Image (tube, rainbow, N blue to C red):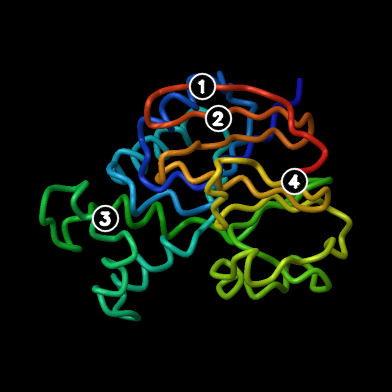
């Protein structure tokens, strides 16, 4: 029996919500979990989130996508941006999760290598998954992903992709905690670090699970539009 493909939106260091969500999903080795990036920063437990995701890769097929916050971490490590540029956008909370006042070099090398292995996008026969945005007339393998993972849907709202596949995205937080479904595009960043929800979506069925840092859980089916 074929496994499910399930996307998880921006976690942003919310380890309690992630634990509750993973328990609710009841994953098997045949399932594929696509995390849409921005697993770290802003929330309180980025280290624990990374450790959960590393363990999750031993339990199912894990496909982590690189978000702009992971990009900032890697850029700070490699000296491509000033450390302060990352710290002021949530990196300070990430470092504190490794010990109050921890230095960048105190992030374990296996954690850095794990983040460095994350990809730009993932696709199935019917959907594609990316962090921030996409250009509708450019094939997926030719997208400028490093640029597009920074571009919010408020800056540019794309039309249907030329492939005919439905986009599943994160990055653009809905501060009401609602899934945005425009038919050709679904955004599941539901502002968990801001007190709302962490969302998982099974695109083929429309099943949605949402959890929060209070360990609350709700389940519903995706509506036709939001």
Q: Disc 1 versus disc 3: distance between alpha carbons? A: 34 Å
Mark 3 against mark 2, which lies toward the viewer? 2
Q: Earlier in the sequence, mark 1 or mark 2?
A: 2
Q: What's the CA distance linking mark 4 and mark 1?
A: 20 Å
Distance between the Cα atoms at labels 1 and 2? 6 Å
Which percent across, then down, holds residue 161?
83, 62
* Circle 1 SS class: strand
Of the two numbered discs 4 and 3 on the same chain, state the one appearing first in sequence: 3
Q: Which residue is mark 2?
A: 210
Q: Secondary structure at mark 2?
A: strand
Left/right placement of residue 108 relative to residue 8 reads: left
Above or below 201: residue 96? below
**Residue located at (47% from left, 64% from top):** 68
CA neighbours of label 3 inside 10 A, class few (<14), some (14 to 19), many (20+): few
First in sequence: mark 3 or mark 2? 3
Tell me the number on the disc at residue 181.
4
- Quadrant, the C terminus: top right
Q: Are marks 1 and 2 in contact (CB under 8 Å)?
A: yes
* Tag of residue 109: 3
Name the residue: 89% across, 56% down. Answer: 164
Indicate whether 152 appears above or below 225.
below
Mark 2 packing: few (<14 Cα in 10 Å), some, or many (20+)?
many
Q: Residue furthest front?
A: 176
- The mark lying in front, picked from 4 and 3, is 4
Name the spot of residue 123 as percent of width and height, x first: 73, 51
- The quadrant holding residue 130 is bottom right
């Amino acid at each position: 029996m074929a496994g499910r493909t399930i996307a998880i939106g921006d976690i942003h260091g919310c380890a309690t919500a992630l634990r509750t969500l993973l328990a609710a999903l009841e994953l098997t080795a045949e399932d594929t979990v696509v995390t849409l990036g921005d697993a770290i920063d802003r929330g309180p437990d980025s280290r624990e989130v990374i450790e959960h995701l590393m363990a999750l890769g031993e339990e199912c097929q894990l496909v982590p996508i690189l978000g702009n916050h992971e990009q900032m971490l890697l850029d700070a490590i490699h000296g491509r941006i000033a450390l302060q540029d990352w710290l002021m956008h949530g990196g300070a909370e990430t470092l504190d999760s490794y010990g109050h006042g921890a230095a960048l070099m105190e992030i374990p090398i296996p954690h850095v290598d794990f983040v460095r292995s994350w990809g730009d996008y993932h696709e199935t026969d019917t959907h594609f998954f990316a962090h921030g945005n996409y250009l509708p007339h450019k094939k997926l393998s030719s997208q400028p992903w490093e640029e597009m993972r920074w571009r919010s849907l408020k800056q540019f709202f794309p039309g249907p992709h030329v492939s005919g596949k439905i986009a599943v995205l994160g990055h653009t937080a809905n501060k009401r905690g609602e899934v945005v479904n425009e038919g050709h595009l679904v955004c599941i960043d539901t502002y968990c670090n801001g007190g709302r929800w962490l969302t998982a979506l099974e695109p083929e069925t429309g099943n949605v699970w949402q959890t929060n840092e209070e360990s609350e859980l709700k389940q519903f089916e995706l509506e036709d539009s939001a």
